């Protein structure tokens, strides 16, 4: 058996470009240069922010599409299970307020109320409503 011959590669590679890191500097370096270090962190920061924004906007757009479809079907309320089945996610809205016992939400220019079991009073906000 050649256990001792089994050598673990004892070089570190740059997390950005994959080049072997020159160990003339600190022994715990993760990047071959400051340029690679900056590119690595900038890209990750950008991707995180971009993905977070895309997922929120994407969910709002999906909700809007569903609410708009319901309105065009001539309905103004639907049970939450059906809405969820269509892809509606009640965690995403563009505004919320409590009016008495009503929980009133908007998704851009569509207004709706949420109850335990229903999405109801779905309607397009008219200019007059926004002036109140
Ligand atoms: Zn590098």
Image: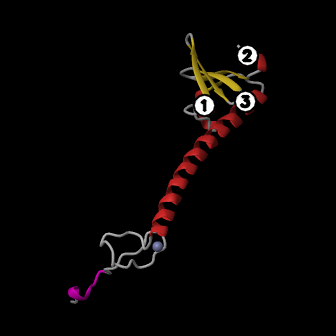
Q: Quadrant of residue 26?
A: bottom left
Q: How many marks?
A: 3
Q: Which residue is mark 3?
A: 70
Q: Quadrant of the N terminus?
A: bottom left
CA–CA distance in space, label 3 to label 1: 16 Å
In the image, residue 122 lies in the stretch drawn in magenta: no
Q: Between residues 122 and 84, which one lies in front from this camera angle?
A: 122
In this picture, residue 69 sits left or right of residue 36: right
Image vertical order of residue 95 relative to residue 18, above or below: above
Magenta-drawn segment: 3-8
Label 3 Cα crowd, 10 Å radius (few <14 / some 14-19 / many 20+): some
Q: Point out the residue furthest to the top here.
A: 100
Specify the label residue 81 is tagged with.
Answer: none
The crowd level at tag 1 (other Cα within 10 Å; few <14, some 14-19, many 20+) is: many
Residue 131 shows which numbered tag? 2
Along the viewing direction, whichever of 110 and 1 lies nearer the viewer? 110
Residue 26 versus residue 86 in the image, above or below = below
Give the mark, 3 or 1, whose residue is nearer the N terminus: 3
Indicate which disc residue 93 carries: 1
Of callouts 2 and 1, the N-terminal one? 1
């Amino acid at each position: 058996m050649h256990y001792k011959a089994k050598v673990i590669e004892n070089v570190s590679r740059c997390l950005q470009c994959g080049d072997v890191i020159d160990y003339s500097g600190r022994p715990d370096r993760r990047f071959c240069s400051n340029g690679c270090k900056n590119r690595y962190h900038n890209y990750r920061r950008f991707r995180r922010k971009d993905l977070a924004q895309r997922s929120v906007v994407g969910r709002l757009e999906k909700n809007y599409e569903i609410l708009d479809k319901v309105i065009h079907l001539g309905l103004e309320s639907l049970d939450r299970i059906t809405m969820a089945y269509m892809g509606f996610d009640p965690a995403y809205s563009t505004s919320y307020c409590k009016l008495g016992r009503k929980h009133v939400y908007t998704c851009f220019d569509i207004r709706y109320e949420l109850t335990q079991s229903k999405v109801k009073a779905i309607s397009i906000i008219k200019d007059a409503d926004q002036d109140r």
